[in-house]
Image (cartoon, rainbow, N blue to C red):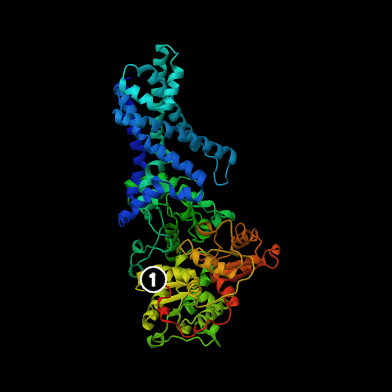
Amino acid sequence: MSPAAITLLMLLAFAGFGWLAWRKLAIVAALQPEPRLDQPLQRLRSVLVNGLLQSRMVRREWRPGVMHAVLFLGFMSLLLRKLQLIAIGYSESASFPNAFGGPFAAFKDAIELAVVAAVLYAFYRRFVLRPRRLAPNREAVLVLSLILAIMLTDFAFDGFRFALLAERYPAIAHERAYAFVGSALATAFSAMSPAALQTGYVLAYWMQMVVVFSFLVLLPVGEHFHIVTALPTLYFRRGRPGHRVPTVDVEKLMEATEEADMKAGVRSARDLTWKDGLDAFTCTECGRCKDACPTHLTGKPLSLKGVNDRLKHHLMEHREAIVADPAAELPALVGGVIGTETLWACTTCGYCEAACPIELEHLDKFFRMRQHQVMIEGEFPHELKKLFEAYESQGNPWGLQADARGDWAQGLGVPVVRTAADLEGLDLLFYVGSAMSFDPRGQRIARAFVKILRRGGVRFGILGPREGSTGESVRRVGNEMLFQQLASALVATLAEVGATRIVTCDPHALNSLRNEYPELGGHYEVLHHTQLIAELLADGRIEIEASAERIVYHDPCYLGRHNGEFDAPRAILERLGAAPPLEFALAREKAMCCGAGGGRMWIDETIGTRINVLRVEQALETSPQTIATACPYCAVMMEDGLAALPAAGTTRSRDIAELVADALVAEVPGAQEPPAATARLGA
């Protein structure tokens, strides 16, 4: 070998890698700062579990997950082998000490065989199975070919090395005793002449080293840069579902006198955070974000993969301005890089983030882009103008009289909480929300839940006409100013009556009250109605009669993915039916959105298939009699979807509260006099 040649090869490769990598990382460093150093132990755990062990990928699809885990772990473990090969470039006898060298040789051969199998499966999957999300990709084929070449040339190198040098160097002979693949090849090569062995030895070495260092230089050029950036990206992940919208300093915005100071959200690439940039360059383009994305599956121009790809190319196109000229004006992202239809198509369901094996983030970017479009540009879907006006005038999306908010409860004798004294002696406050206060479909759910609470002896009250909207919808479409007005008013009302324990049937309200209101001074223990019903059943506070009805359960995004509650609704349905509840093909973490989230409830759906229709079609695949929901918005979307499909026949949509209320048996003795255990409901 030639020490000068291996030195030159390394210098050229590392220089090329460093220069190409810095072209991207310099952009990341120039973007907006954002602290990401909290909770170091949890961050390291994510690196170990989802990075090194590829847990998220294996859990979702075990075959391709294991394939990627083998490739990644093989890449990491064989770094030590490459160090040995570099040392061999300086001294042909370079070996690890015997105590380590022999076992490592066996380990290396086993890992390399596993990597070869994984690469062959990857080719089979890409060219034979051809899953829909895998688009034709020449770079992926090239990288897989390079990996295969590295493995095969390493086997060949060991074969020639053992045949040529094992008798001369005891350490190499010791390696041969363990390296089962290399030893077998050495036996096959042993009949060759010394000159032929020397030629094969040199060719196999340099072919491998040239491929290895070419691969290194290739990494920063395309999507496989994630091999370098994936672990740092996992470490600096947000570490929570995308259930909180980034806050805007509305007071500062209102006080701004110069146009340059009137900023909110994201206008151009310069407003992105460094983590946004790192995510764009780290995207593996695996397409998993599309598997249950409601917009992608219904033909709308949105996927996390597509957004990251466009951002990545845009950042590189404007690299010099971003890195070297902070004063340079950059083009707006929305309307060019991110299409208007793309921005407003998102239902904020969070599937793409939950599916991404390296936890790339999507929602924060879109929330901030919407904030800029609404609050600064005044450009948004025309339907939202009517929505904003309705909230401004009456505090609800229908624009109905605010003082009629409690009319749904007339004749039910529900206590109305007007003061802190009214709340004394009650177990909790029932936050009804706009959908169940004003929409007839939601009102039926509210009445059913009241029946359950009464039967279970739960002492509760409602705010009635004093109840305000959480503002969840307007926040997710970018009107942060209106959201803060609505939220501040509700926080003040809840503080005035002393509410700390709240139950709601609306996952969107639950999410806002639980996860977003603490920033505004509102700290509450918030239960979803399915959680409370499940506890009442488990404690024997209510009893229900099972039936043979075929029920399939639709997971609401803001209850399941965003707040982690999958089991309580299913526990109830198991008690309701003689058989376990049916499941969608896309259920639990993979559940597809109904189409109402992210403010989409109020925006006409004009591109592709209607999301709720597709979701109902997915339900009908299980031949259900009932589609069970646990969200008033999902209930509306499922009913509308059923109405649009003649094939639905007599299939109906019902909230779990309605199903339970209909199945209640005679009152449980003593239920009207709640035991002391009542105080722990939801604890």
Q: Quadrant of residue 6?
A: top left
Task: Identify the residue under disc 1.
Answer: 517
Q: Quadrant of residue 159?
A: top left
Disc 1 crowd, CA 10 A, few/some/many (<14, 14-19, 20+): many
Count the marks: 1
Say if 596 sits above or below 228 in the image: below
* Quarter of the image where the N terminus is located: top left
174 on left or right of 674? left
Percent x, y of residue 18: 33, 37
Q: Is residue 274 visible?
A: no
Percent x, y of residue 30: 33, 49
Q: Which residue occupies the foreground of this view, 544 or 230?
A: 544
Circle 1: element type = helix
Say if 12 sits above or below 73 in the image: above
At a point 56% along the width and 76% down the height, the residue shown is 445
Percent x, y of residue 512: 43, 69
Q: Quadrant of residue 552?
A: bottom right
Amino acid at the residue labelled 1: Tyr
586 on left or right of 517? right
Percent x, y of residue 609: 62, 58
Q: Which residue occupies the foreground of this view, 480 or 347?
A: 347
